[in-house]
Image (cartoon, grey):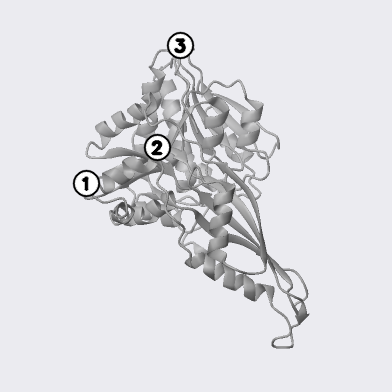
Amino acid sequence: MTDDLAPAVELLRRLIACDTSNPPGRETQAAAILEDFFADTNVECTRVAKDPARANLLCRLAGSGEGPSLAFLGHLDVVPARLEEWSVEPFAAVLRDGEVWGRGAVDMKSQVAAVAAALATLDRQGFRPRGDLMLILTADEEVGDAEVGAPYFVEQMPDLRIDYVVGEGAGERIATSRGPIYLLDIGAKATATVKLEVRGRAGDASLPAIAPNALDETARLLSRLAAYRPPSRVIPELEPLLTFLAPDATAEQRIEQARRAHPALDELVPALTRTVTHATLAESNGPANVIPSSASITLKCILVPGTTRADLDGELREALGAGDYTLELEGPDGGSVSTPDSPLRAAIEDFLAEHDPDARLVPALGYGFSDCHLFRTAYEATVYGFIPFRHGAPMVNLTTKHASDERVSIADVAFQLAAARHVAGAIGRQAGRAAVRSER
């Protein structure tokens, strides 16, 4: 291992071994590991905590004030791991065949460790940036309802100057017939939560047809929802991706042609061009010997930017059809977008030109939630989602993140470390304050 890779891998293993499953989170214990890592450097660490057990952490290598500032944005919490579904202990940070296995390896403790090691290396080499270089680590990103994470951070730090942000998002290397690509998330889809309340009528569960069963009706409605295919919407931010993947296809054919370019794109392209809805919670109360009179289902909806509440309501009612139910919508939230043209994108492209010259960086959207949109809005910053995985198979990331046997190759930790060092150095050497970027 190189001099800075070994500390990055060691830090990653410490972070994975620190169980920050959310709930309950307990992110402060991971923040303390970062504070210890930076203890002998010029990187200053500041906790921003509403709950002492769930701190956000600002790690800053101060600049001279003569250039733009750059923040790497990550989160310290992880989704829970069900031990019986894993082939290894999920919090043991097992080393196997050149990979680090454990909950959070991909989402997103490898990037946290790589950026931390990059800042420490730049400091050790005597690099003094013109603008601040930061690593901002938030709590409660995975759940988001405790009001202790990114919303609290931006509220408490309104005067923090951030021009550019690299956050969670795309970065898998996807092979296509036109050459390998990395996606750059210049924005993200919006999110909405819908409460589906289904009504039946109470009755004696000993009788076969005495009353309509709310759970039977719920099953029927959810089956209709699962079979429904919402209409596709291609917003301007997705044109570069579809143009690259399907340059000769008609408007009606290009989504299907783009999906055929790679198994990962078969998942990603539909996710980026239509509403994605899943039932995530179900509740029905009452005695076990009584036919339930009601059931409540929580639907999580991920929306193409620009989709309104009325649009979503119409899609859901078309999918569900007739029935005795009500819909209660919250949102949409998020869905902001940054300009695709910036010095930050240029820095990432320069890194790829040097380290993976056959590959191309293609702007797209993030398919899932991240804290990026809060920083785009609060600081008028240009924010991209990008965590590069040069060596790991894209489908492994997509199928193990938030699932079992999550792991990252040490070669990709090295690649992320090199990327963070390059981008931080490129932005840190620039003179002049960055212009305010457009947002949606």
Instruction: Using the image, determine if residue 178 lies above or below residue 279.
Output: above
- Horizontal and vertical percent for residue 343? 37, 24
Figure quadrant of the N terminus: top left
Q: Residues within 10 Å of mark 1 (few under 14, many from 20)?
A: few
Q: Estimate how packed mark 2 is, as few (under 14), some (14 to 19) or many (20 or more) residues with alpha carbons within 10 Å.
A: some
Mark 3–mark 1 Cα distance, whole angstroms, equals: 41 Å
Q: Earlier in the sequence, mark 1 or mark 2?
A: 2
Q: Secondary structure at mark 1?
A: loop
Q: Which residue is mark 3?
A: 66
Q: Is residue 255 left or right of residue 435?
A: left
What amino acid type should be assigned to the residue bearing mark 3? Glu
Q: Is residue 166 among the parts visible in the rendering?
A: yes
Which residue is label 1 attached to?
178
Q: Which residue is mark 2?
A: 6
Spot occupied by residue 399 in the image (x, y as percentages of width and height):
42, 57
Name the kind of residue labelled 1 in the image: Arg
Q: Closer to us: mark 3 or mark 2?
A: 3
